Image (spheres, coloured by chain):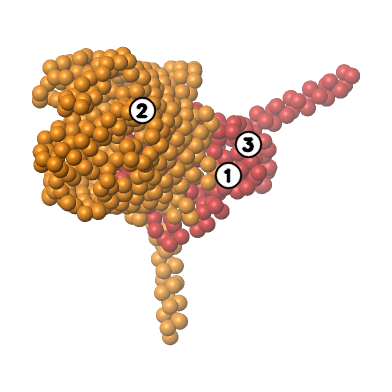
Chain colours: A red, B orange
Amino acid sequence: MKKIATVLFIFLVSVALYASDNTQLLKQVDRNLNPESFESYRKLINIEPNGREKEFVLFTVKKGKDKIAALFISPASEKGRSTLRLDENMWLYIPNVGKPVRITSLQSVVGGVFNNSDILRLDYAEEYDVVEVEDLGEEYLLHLKAKTNSVAYDKLRMWADKKKSLPNKIECLTEASMLIKTIYFKQIKDFGGGIIRPSVIETDSPLHQGYKSVMIFAGIKQREFKDEVFTLPFLPNLESLR
Amino acid sequence: MRSITLYFILVNLLVSGLLAQEEHTFDLSEIEKKPFQFGGYLEFRPVLFGLNRDSRLYELKFYDLEEGKTIAEYNFNALLDASYEKGIFRAKIRTNTDITKSFSGWTHNTTLYEALLSVNPSLSFHLDIGKKRMKWGKGYAWNPVAFIDRPKNPNDPELALEGYVVLSMDYIKSFQGKLKTISFTPFLLPVNEHINSTFGKPNQLNFGGKLYFLFYDTDIDLLFLSGGSMPARYGIDFARNITSNFEIHGEFAYIPDYNKKIIQADDTVGEEKYSSVNYLLGIRFLTKTNTTFFFEYLKNGNGYTSYELENFYSLIDQAYQSYLLSGDDSQLEFLSGAASQTYRTFAPVQDYLYIRISQKEPWNILYFIPSFTSIINLTDNSFSLTPELLYNPFTNLELRAKMTILFGKDGSEFGEKQNDLRLEFRGRYYF
C-alpha cells in the first residue's frame, strides 16, 4: 500500500513539475515578445486578393496581466477611435458616438483577418494552459488550451524557437480543432532596451481565402502607467500619453 | 506574339505585386505627434422623399404647396475639427456646416458643435470648460438618461451633434478586486439668453453629475440633473457582457415633476404635471458568422398616449379644413410651431422597439456592412423598415445607401408622417 502511495506521489509531483516547466516556457515566450508593461506603435495592413490594401496605425499601451488600450492614429476615418481591454471586458470609443460601447473579442474593429483579441492581445499564459509540449529538434510545439470559454480561440498550436524562446508560427483552432487562422512571426529586430522580437506578424485564414493581414511594429519600449489610464473615462484622452 | 505580351504583363504584375508586399515598412517618423491637428469630413447626401399626401403631417407642412409625389433634397455637409495641445492644456473646436438645396430653395447653416479648453494636471483629474457633449447613457438608439445631450436620431444614432456650454471635471480612481474603477463627473451648466438658450428656462445655473463604477465587470452609472431650467431628474444605467458575444444594457430615468406640453383644442399649449418614468433595455448578440442582432425596448414616460397623438392629428385636420374653407392658415402655423418642439420629436409616444441586424463583410467583401433596421411603435403597431448598405471602397471614403419605408394605418405615428418613403445616398470623405 505504501509503495502504491509513493509511486502515486512521485507521479503527481512529476506531472506538476512538468506542467510548471511548460507554463514557464510559455511565460518566457510572452516576456520575450514584450515587457509586461509597455507602449508600442503598430501598423496593420489588410491585403485583399486583388492587391488592394488598407493601413491602420495604432498606439498601444499595456500594463500588467490584464490591461491594454489602443488608439487609432490613422487613417483619418478612424483617427481618435480607441479600444480598451480589462481582462475579458472590451470597449470601443468612437469620437462621434461618444460613449464607449462594449465589443467582443471575435469582432474586428479594423476588418480583415485580425480580430479584436489579436489587436488587444494579453499574454498567452494569461489566457491559455499548456496541455502538451513536443520537442521537434530546433523548435518546441506547444499545445495550448483556453482557460475560459470567453477566449477567442479554444486551442492554439504554437511553434516556438528553442534558442530564442520566440514563436515562429501559431495555429488558432476551434474546440473541434478546425483551423481558424495561422499567425506567422517574422523579421526579428532589436527594438532596444533588451527587446529583441519579431517585428512583423502576418496572418491568413482558410475562412478568408486569399486575404492576408500584416502587423508591423515600429517601436516597443517598456513604460509604466497608472491604473487610471485603463478606464473608460480616460479613453478619450489616450492621445495625451503620446 | 499576343500571348508572349500577355505573359510578360502577368509576370510583371506578379513581380510588382510581390515587390509591393515586400515594401511594407513602418517608421516612427510617420507618426510624429504634432501640437496642432486639423481634420474632419466632407459629405454629399442627396435624398428623395416619397410624400404621403394623405397624411396629417403632410397637410401641416405642405398645405399651401403643390410638390407632387416626390421631392428631392441635396445636402452638402462639412464637419471640421481642429485642436492644439501644449503641456497639460488642450484646446479643441468642432464646427458643422450644412448647405441644403430643397423644394424651398438653398439654405446654409454653420453651427459651433464644440469649443473646449481642457486641462489635465494628472491622469486622475481632467477639467473641461466650454461647449461639449456629455454623451451619457448606454443605449444605441435612445438614451433616457442623457439629461444634458441633444436627442439622437434613432435613424442615424452615430451622427455628430451639438453640445452645451459646461464646466465639468472628471476624477478617476482605479482599484484591484471586483470594484475596478470609480469616476465622478460633476458639471455646471448656465442658461441665459446668450448661453445654452435652447436648454430650458433662462437665467438658471443648472448642476448635476455622473458617478461611474466598473463593478463585477459591469459598467454602472448613477446620474442626476437639477437647477431650474428643467425639472430635476435622476437616472441609472448599466452595461455588461453576459458572454463574450452577448451584451445587455439598460437605462432608467425618473423625473418627479415632469411637465408634458399638450396642445389644446382652443389653440393653447397646456401642461400636464406627473412623475415620469423612462427606461430602456437592450441586448446585442454576435453570431459566429459575424451577424449582429441588436434589440432595444424604450418605455418613454415623457411621450404621448395614442389618444393624445390622435387628438393632435384631429386638430391638424380641423385646421386644414378651416384653411381650405377660409384661406386662414394661422391655426396651421400655430400647430406647426408648437408641434416641432413637442409632438415631432424622435420618440413622440411611449413604447418603442428598435431592431437592427447587420452582417459584417459578407462574401469576404472587406469594409462592407449590409444591415436592416426597424423602429416599431408598439402602441399603434406602425413601423419603419430601413435596409442599408455601408461600404468603404478606399481609405477615408465611406459610401452609404439606405431606403426607409414607413408603414401604419391612419392616425398612427408612422402612418401620419409627411413621407412614407425615403431614399438616401451618402458619400463621405475623411481628411
Q: Could you classify mark 1 by the number of other residues whose Cα lies within 10 Å: few (under 14), some (14-19), or many (20 or more)?
A: many
- In space, the residues marked 2 and 1 are separated at their CA atoms by 48 Å
Please tell me which residue lies in front, A159 or A108. Answer: A108
Chain holding disc 3? A
Q: Secondary structure at mark 1?
A: strand
Residue type, label 2? Gln
Against B428, residue B94 (above or below) is above
- Give the residue at mark 2: B350
| 2 or 3: mark nearer the eye | 2
Both on one chain, marks 2 and 3? no
Which mark, residue B321? none
| First in sequence: mark 1 vs mark 3 | 3
Chain holding disc 1? A
Which mark, residue A172? 1
Residue type, label 3? Lys
Which mark, residue A145? 3
Against B56, residue A186 (above or below) is below
As drawn, which residue projects farthest toward the bottom?
B1
Please tell me which residue lies in front, A108 or B37. Answer: A108
Q: Could you classify mark 2 by the number of other residues whose Cα lies within 10 Å: few (under 14), some (14-19), or many (20 or more)?
A: some
Residue B294: x and y in percent read: 45, 37
Residue type, label 1? Cys
Residue B7 visible in the displayed image:
yes
Residue A226 visible in the displayed image:
no
Tell me which residue sits at (50%, 58%) in the image: A210
